[in-house]
Structure formats: structure tokens, C-alpha cells
Image (cartoon, rainbow, N blue to C red):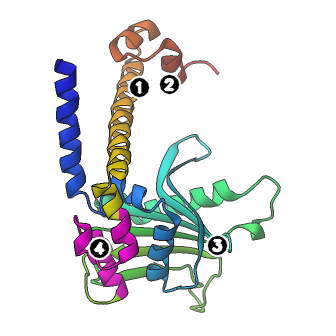
């Protein structure tokens, strides 16, 4: 009975949290923009390319670097020309640092190239940060970062693009109205119908609410597991406990502990 009460309370908490979520909250944004039509609309506004057609949009796309470090991209979209778009929501300035943009861009290049392909086959790519604050602090609504040849001022032409969108500016331009919609908690207050319909689905439709509550539960479980894995790594670093002892404390299997142990012989 106590378990049922706990689950009911947790469900009420989820519903309250869902009610207050905005597109500026990455766990909500990723569900909305995994719909290719929503991702397409977003990119058309940001890039001012209304002919752009998205063929695929994936949320929480996991990729790894050569050392095996895993990174999850909020949204990874592909258009009809096979251009790649990584869209990230960042409420924290730290999470949208310039080195993070460079890192994401390099990971995309490394993971979309097949062995034996020529470098010229690299897809044109865009890393787009939509930030709650004006991270670059110049008071502009949008920043386009491109490589150039310093001596001539000419574009380098590597087809790698980084864009920062400042959600603080909510004027009557198409981008400003988009940023207004990103700050809304209620679909009826939004300008753009395609986004309002998707938000309304996850907040008001029974099936959509169920999907969103399940997604929030999965995120909680994943966060709890990450915390457990970090605890196990910290215990391994002490070099005082056996695999069995760490497994008993953390609830992980001995096999999982062994896999985490980076100091074990190759």
C-alpha cells in the first residue's frame, strides 16, 4: 500500500513538473523536437532557409570519442542534402562554452565518416546552441561563428558552422517570437501553431502525457544509475575494496564493477 501511495505521489509530482516545463528545458525540448516537422520549422527560422526539409530528427543521440567518452546530443537532425544539425538547449552558460561547441562539432565529424571515405565527403554540419542567457554577451539575438583566413578575411569554406541563439531577446521578429514560444509553459500563449500543437499533445493529451511522464521516469532512473556508477568509480579509486564489496554497497553486478575498473590489467 505504501508503494502505491509513493507511486501516486510521484505521478502527481511529474504532472506538476510537466505543467511548468518549457521548450527551454532540455528534457521537454528533446521530446518536442524529435518530431522532424518541429525540428524543420526550428531550423527554417534560425537559418532563414524556408526551403530546408528535415528527413530525420533524433533526440538524445549518443556518440563517443576515441577514448570511449560518451556524449548525448539533445537533437541530431538531417536534411535532404544530408547536412547535419546538432541542436542543444543550454540553460547554464557553462554548458554552452565555446570549447563545448568545438567538441560537439568534432564528434559529429568523427562519427559520420565511414572508414576509407575521403575527407571531402564530410557532410556540412551545424552546431546550434539555444541559450537561456546571452552567453557571448554582445546583446545580439543570434551569433554565427565561421572560420576565416585572417590575412584575407575570406571564408575558410570547411562547411562547419556554429550558431548561438540568445533566448533573452523576444521581439516581434520571427526569431524573437520563436524565443517567446521557448519560454511559454502553456500552448495557448505560443505564436507558432506547429510548436503549440506538439506542446499541447505532451501536456494535455492523455497519450502524450503518459509518454512524457515515462520519459521523465526514465531520466530519473538514468540519473540514479549515473550516480551509482560514479560512486563505484570513486570506491575503485580508493583501491581498498574488492569487487564483491563494491557490488554489495552499490547494487551493481561484479561484472559491471570489473568493466568500470580502468586500472585492471588489459
Q: Earlier in the sequence, mark 3 or mark 4?
A: 3
- The numbered mark at residue 260 is 2
Residue contact at pointers 4 and 1, CB within 8 angstroms: no
How far is the residue under mark 2 from the one under mark 1?
A: 7 Å
Q: Are marks 2 and 1 in contact (CB under 8 Å)?
A: yes
Tag 4's secondary structure?
Answer: helix
> Element under label 1?
helix
On screen, residue 219 above or below 175: above
Q: Is residue 90 visible?
A: no
Q: Which residues are magenta?
A: 174-198
Q: Please name the residue that numbered disc 1 is placed on.
A: 233
Residue at 20% across / 32% down in the picture?
8
Q: Which mark is residue 181?
A: 4
Name the mark on residue 124. 3
Q: Nearer the viewer, mark 3 or mark 4?
A: 4
* Residue for point 50% across, 22% down: 261
Q: Estimate the x, y position of residue 112 in percent, counting from the top left.
A: 67, 58
Left or right: where 33 falls relative to 106: left
Amino acid at each position: 500500500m505504501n508503494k502505491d501511495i509513493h507511486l501516486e505521489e510521484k505521478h502527481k509530482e511529474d504532472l506538476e513538473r510537466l505543467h511548468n516545463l518549457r521548450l527551454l528545458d532540455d528534457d521537454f525540448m528533446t521530446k518536442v523536437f524529435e518530431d522532424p516537422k518541429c525540428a524543420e520549422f526550428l531550423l527554417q527560422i534560425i537559418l532563414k532557409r524556408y526551403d530546408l526539409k528535415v528527413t530525420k530528427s533524433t533526440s538524445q543521440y549518443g556518440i563517443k570519442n576515441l577514448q570511449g567518452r560518451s556524449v548525448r546530443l539533445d537533437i541530431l537532425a538531417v536534411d535532404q542534402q544530408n547536412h547535419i544539425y546538432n541542436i542543444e538547449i543550454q540553460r547554464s552558460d557553462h554548458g554552452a562554452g565555446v570549447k563545448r561547441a568545438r567538441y560537439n562539432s568534432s564528434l559529429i565529424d568523427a562519427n559520420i565518416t565511414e572508414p576509407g571515405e575521403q575527407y571531402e565527403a564530410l557532410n556540412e554540419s551545424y552546431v546550434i546552441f539555444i541559450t537561456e542567457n546571452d552567453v557571448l554577451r554582445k546583446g545580439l539575438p543570434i551569433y554565427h561563428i565561421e572560420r576565416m583566413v585572417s590575412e584575407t578575411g575570406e571564408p575558410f569554406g570547411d562547411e562547419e558552422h556554429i550558431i548561438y541563439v540568445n533566448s533573452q531577446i523576444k521581439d516581434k521578429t520571427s526569431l524573437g517570437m520563436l524565443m517567446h514560444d521557448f519560454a511559454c509553459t502553456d500552448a495557448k500563449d505560443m505564436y507558432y501553431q506547429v510548436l503549440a500543437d506538439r506542446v499541447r499533445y505532451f501536456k494535455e493529451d492523455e497519450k502524450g502525457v503518459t509518454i512524457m511522464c515515462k520519459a521523465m521516469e526514465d531520466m530519473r532512473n538514468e540519473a540514479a544509475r549515473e550516480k551509482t556508477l560514479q560512486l563505484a568509480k570513486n570506491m575503485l579509486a580508493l583501491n581498498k575494496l574488492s569487487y564483491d564489496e563494491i557490488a554489495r554497497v552499490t547494487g551493481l553486478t561484479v561484472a559491471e564493477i570489473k568493466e568500470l575498473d580502468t586500472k585492471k590489467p588489459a
